[in-house]
Amino acid sequence: MQQDIDAAVQGVDAYWQTHWSEFFTGTYSSPTVYGEYDSASAVDPQCRGKPPLANNAFYCWLPEDFIAWDIHLMENGYAAGDVYVYFIIAHEWGHAVQARLDVRLRDIALELQADCIAGAELNGAAQDGTILFEEGDADELGQAIKSTADAFPWNKATDHGDVNQRISYFNRGWQGGISACLPQSSVRGN
């Protein structure tokens, strides 16, 4: 599992290192990857003074600027398919990208936009050859998205959207790239 986590982090980050200037002005800086935490442990990453929730992955917005995930969430998802960790990391990286954008480029539906960005990042990294998908991974991606749609007790009923919305936004990014994820036609304006 750790090899897949490392490949997801490196592949998504390499995508932005390579392609940021094609879509946005300014320079790209990678978020810090705190990585795994154990929600059963007293040593957890704090985001704005609050401990993380169990079975969660999150991006802690600027100025803290880090991505973290509960190891139990990743292990449970990974048991259903190795591509699960790629989706979780790409989704949280999508929030890191949102934090770097001009507010006019952020969609009101931040969680769904992060799904869209995740689709664009993963497909872009696959096209660049920095992430390699295997036969059957498309089905696993669909299952990963389904398993994370408002199904956790800490989610509000409309945080991440229902299954159809999440799959639709992910596919929009996968097929249309980053431009399909932005609310404006003028992309280079961050």
Image (cartoon, grey):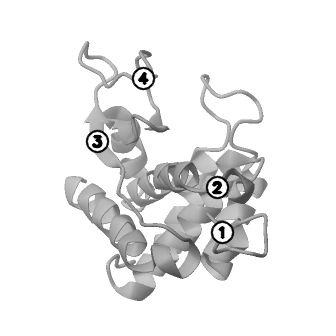
Name the side, left or right, on which 87 lies relative to 162: left
Residue designated by label 3: 35
Q: Label 4, label 1: how many angstroms apart (C-alpha)?
A: 33 Å
Where residue 72 appears, as percent x and y from the top left, is: 35, 33
Name the side, left or right, on which 52 lies relative to 98: left
Q: Amino acid at mark 1?
A: Gly
Q: Amino acid at mark 4?
A: Pro
Q: Which mark is residue 93?
A: none
Which of disc 1 and disc 4 is earlier in sequence?
4
Which of disc 1 and disc 2 is earlier in sequence?
2
Name the side, left or right, on which 95 lies relative to 19: right
Q: Quadrant of the C terminus?
A: bottom right
Name the side, left or right, on which 163 lies relative to 22: right
Residue designated by label 2: 102
Which of disc 1 and disc 3 is earlier in sequence?
3
Asked which secondary structure carries label 3, the reply is strand
For discs 3 and 2, the disc positioned in front in the rendered view: 2
Where residue 43 appears, as percent x and y from the top left, is: 23, 18
Q: Quadrant of the N terminus?
A: bottom left
Q: Which mark is residue 52?
A: 4
Where residue 4 appears, as percent x and y from the top left, is: 28, 61
Q: Which mark is residue 189?
A: 1
Where residue 93 appears, as percent x and y from the top left, is: 46, 54
Q: Are marks 4 and 1 in contact (CB under 8 Å)?
A: no
Can you see residue 119?
yes
Which of disc 4 and disc 3 is earlier in sequence?
3
Name which quarter of the figure residue 128 lies in. bottom left
Around disc 3, counting alpha carbons within 10 Å, would you say few (fewer than 14), some (14 to 19), or many (20 or more)?
A: some
Point 24% across, 59% down: residue? 6
Q: Label 2, label 1: how many angstroms apart (C-alpha)?
A: 7 Å
Q: Is residue 113 above or below residue 181?
A: above
